[in-house]
Structure formats: C-alpha cells, structure tokens
Image: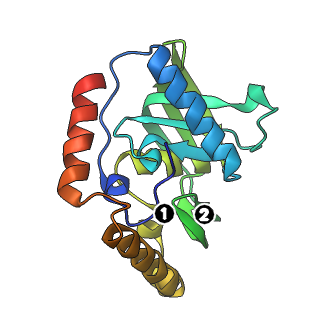
Amino acid sequence: MRIVKYPHPTLRHKSKPLRRVDAELKQVVAEMLEWMYRDRGIGLAANQVDLPYRLFVMNIESDPAAKDQEFVFINPVISRRTGSVEGEEGCLSLPEIFAPVRRSEKIVLSAYNLRGEEVNLELSGLFARVAQHEYDHLDGVLFIDRLSASSQLAVKQALSDLEAEFHGDRNRGQIPNDQQIAARLAELEALRT
C-alpha cells in the first residue's frame, strides 16, 4: 500500500460500497491510518491508496496516540449540508499544494464503523471540512476541482510538476497503464463490493 499522487487514475475512480467488515478490511484500515500518520495527514480515502472502496479514515489531531480521535467511515452518505465557509485545504495526494475551498459549514453524515454498526453524526468545523474532502475523494472529486479561477491559476505550475513526475514514473515502468489500473480496480471491486 502507498499513497498515490495526482494525476493517478484511481483518484478519479468513483468508489464502490463495501459489503462486509472482516479481518482483511480491518487490516486495510490499520494500514491506511499508518500511512495517514506517516505523511502527517488528518484524513485519507481508500482511493488515495489505490483501492476502489467507499471508505475513509480521519483523525483531525493527526496523532496516532489519540486513538479516541480515530474515525473510520464505511459507505458514508452525507444527508444534509448547511451553511457555507471557506478554508484552506491540502491533500496527501497533492503534496505541497494548498488553496482556499468553500464547503458546507455543517453536515449530517451516516456510515458504518469497523464494528459494522451504523453511525449518524452531525459535524461542523474542521471535522465537517475533512469529512467532505474525503467524501469527495470517494466520488473521484479532488479539492482542486472546487477552486476559484484565481486559485486554479495559482496552483497550475504545481499541478504540472506533479503530472510530469507521474508521467516520468509511468515511463520508467513504476506505474501501470490506465487499462491495467482499471482491470485491477474491477478485480478488487468484484472481491469486496
């Protein structure tokens, strides 16, 4: 497992719901949390680690010792959004890129946890922002898709640099071609969704 970077195709893949919580999924979640902490993130979606599942993890403290702040959301649904607030965002799949993004101030999120129990939460502040950011990932939406024209212009060179790095890695055989990635994602979906 590793965190994939823009413009990796899995980041644009619409994730599929999971059917069950089992030991294998718990191991995936543990590894996702490790990667999130290693890269000093506060949220990580499954497609950021090249998996096609509707799953994300969060710890807005970014502290592996704060286990009570770890959240796992399986098959999440945002049912209500209220208010609007702008704040700076970044992304582990778009390293060193930060820009202001407008999000709902409050949301109601329903999902399943790692015990297979349904949870319903009313979220606000940073918790709501991170949940919306990660939820977008599950639909193949990146925070750069939500930027104003001036903010898009400000990050254009950084995105071009990431694209050049990606194509260089692909040319060196470190990243499979799009057809191979699509076939692998379809195979993984067939196993768990």
Image quadrant of residue 78?
A: top left
| Real-space Cα separation, disc 1 to disc 2, in angstroms | 8 Å
Q: Amino acid at mark 2?
A: Gly
| Point 26% across, 24% down: residue | 191
120 horizontally vs 70: left or right? left
Query: Can you say which quadrant of the picture contains the C terminus?
Result: top left
CB within 8 Å, label 1 to label 2: yes
Asked if residue 83 is positioned above or below residue 5 in the image, the reply reads: above
Position in image of residue 133 (x %, y %): 52, 52
Q: Which one is in front, 116 or 191?
A: 191
Q: Secondary structure at mark 2?
A: strand
Q: Give residue 143's mark.
A: 1
Asked if residue 11 is positioned above or below residue 89 in the image, the reply reads: above
Q: Give residue 90's mark.
A: 2
Q: Amino acid at mark 1?
A: Phe
In this view, the residue farthest toward the right is 65
Q: Secondary structure at mark 1?
A: helix
Image quadrant of residue 55?
A: top left
Residue 82 seen anywhere in this rendered image of the structure: yes
| Point 43% across, 65% down: residue | 6
114 horizontally vs 17: left or right? right
Asked if residue 41 is positioned above or below residue 171 in the image, the reply reads: above
33 horizontally vs 25: left or right? right
Disc 2 residue crowd, few under 14, some 14–19, many 20+, Cα 10 Å: some
In this view, the residue farthest toward the front is 172
Residue 150 seen anywhere in this rendered image of the structure: no
Q: Earlier in the sequence, mark 1 or mark 2?
A: 2
Position in image of residue 171 (x %, y %): 32, 72
